[in-house]
Amino acid sequence: MVAEETQREAASADRGTGGTARTGRARTAHRPAANTAWRALAAAGSGLAQLLALPPYGLWWLGPLSAALLAYAVMGTRMRRAAWLGLVSGAALMVPLLQWQVVFGTDVWLVIAAAESAYFVPMAMGISCVTRLRGWPVWTAALWVLQEAVRARFPLGGFPWGKLAFAQPDTPFSGYAAWGSSALVTFMVALSGALLLAVVLRLVRDRGGAVAPTAAALAATAAVLAAGMVLPAIGAPRHDHTATVGLVQGNVPGAGEMNILGERMQVLDNHVEGVHTLAEQVRSGAKARPDLVVLPENASDIDAYTDAEAAEMISAAARDIGVPLLFGITKYSKGGAEREIRSVVWGPENGPGDHYTKRYIVPFGEYIPFRDFFTRFVDRLDQVGSDAVPGTRPGALELGDTTVAAAICFDVAFDRPVRDSVAAGGQILVVPTNNANYNFTGQSDQQLAITQLRAVEHGRPAVIASTSGVSAVVTADGTVTYRSPEAEPAVHVAELPAMTGLTPATRLGAAPEAALGAIAAGTLLAGAAVGRRSRARPTAQEAPSAPDTDKP
């Protein structure tokens, strides 16, 4: 049975790569990864390549290699084998990538990593299916988009961390974000990898011949990279005015530990003092006077709407600096059973005004789904004493003459919150965040890279204000011009262009992702039909002399 399956896979591999070999020997020469051990190594290598492409490693050029290795691993194999190879690839990526979740417990980390790895199973099966078709590099890339689209939505609102696109914050691929958001970036990265794999397979099969098809594939890959660098300039937003933006990173006690919000007054005091420090530097001439100041998510976990002392501390800081603050505040309701995670416009004269409420909240971190059920088995979930509830409105907030597009922490990993805030009039992206539990784990670097891609996507500079780092300033082309230290207080002022007009990506919204997902679904059906016809043919005719290389 093993020999029979290997023969079928060899014949399928010939068809998937456009092979025309007429002998068993020729087929064996270019059969992709027929041996199980080599397939497993390629699958694991795919996951590790994607891991190293992402921050904090940042070897972005390994992104295409990741897509190529997974296609190589599953090409020509049957669905059952492709399934476990996909799981190997997903686990090699997700287990180390999400290690920062260990702050909630090793079990939480491994369960989340396992759930995320599972999405690679149907994708690998699909790639095995579509590589039977002509044009398979395109269909393979579309399947990557479909996998990430589903993973970003299901279950519990989704968890898009680790997208291929998020390894490309300021690379030749990042420009595609301005036309098709993260979906088009992922597609182009995967397409480049698949095209390069096709080149290698043809060279091996034809022993260096077939110059014209090889040159065409290499030219297509080069064109992908060149277009990515040009696209952001086409239909780019315009400069409206220059805004001087301040940010404050107040730091927290016990950064990198669980329950850093236990000393709530200390956290609030640190961030208020940060505003006073900035005001003193402005008065001394060390820093330019800002037009607005951005503070982190949870800068006050005390409800300053109801706590008079907290409200006065924030108001005094706003009066000292003399400009509006965007202050992270937790607003409690229903006797403390529910809360909103807000960024509030706090003026020096009028106090709290407009606000944005975080739209994507973290399951098991900021709220407990099915609380009565899960708390029976995991006692520490009771530490999340109140459930956060999501906001529904875009985060376009006016601070003086500038409208900012706010996305709080986890929001920035999703396409919709930032897009809605920009479409509603946001001119500068602001990302208040609280990464204090994750200092020195790489999580903050991953979030910074996502923000860089969002800046390119919407043609706007971005400001990240974190409780304990990384706070940063990013230009509209994804370049980081300021980065704070971690677990230390920091203040910074930057002059940024406030932009007007929308990029094609902002205008098109989810349409490119939907189109690529539909292409993937359609080619899956075509690939399945080809597979059924292949299985109907006599095995002896398909691969008459293919050796049983899968045997130990």
Image (spheres, rainbow, N blue to C red):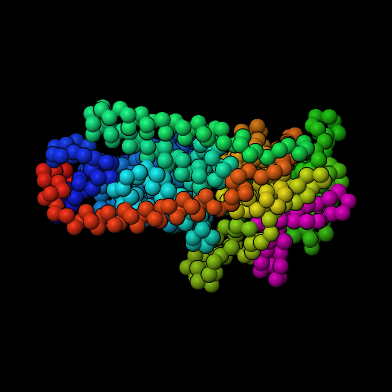
**Residue 447's spot in the image, x, y percent?**
57, 44
Residue 444 in the image: state x and y as whole percent: 57, 43
Task: Please tell me in which quadrant of the rendered image residue 249 appears.
Answer: top right
Residue 91 place in picture, x, y as percent: 38, 49
377 or 421: nearer the viewer: 421
Residue 544 in view here: yes
Whether residue 444 is visible, yes or no, is no
Kindly identify the residue that appears in the image at 72 percent across and 49 percent down.
425
Residue 493 in the figure: left or right of residue 25: right
Farthest-out residue, right? 349
Q: Residue at x 27, y 30 (%)?
A: 210
* Image-based side of 530 in relation to 456, left or right: left
The part of the chain drawn in magenta is: 330-358
- Asked whether 113 or 303 is in front, the reply is 113
Q: Is residue 465 magenta?
A: no
Say left or right for 478 vs 356: left
Residue drawn 47% across and 68% down? 377
Q: Residue at x 50, y 68 (%)?
A: 374
Question: Taken as a whole, is the magenta stretch helix, strand or loop?
Answer: strand
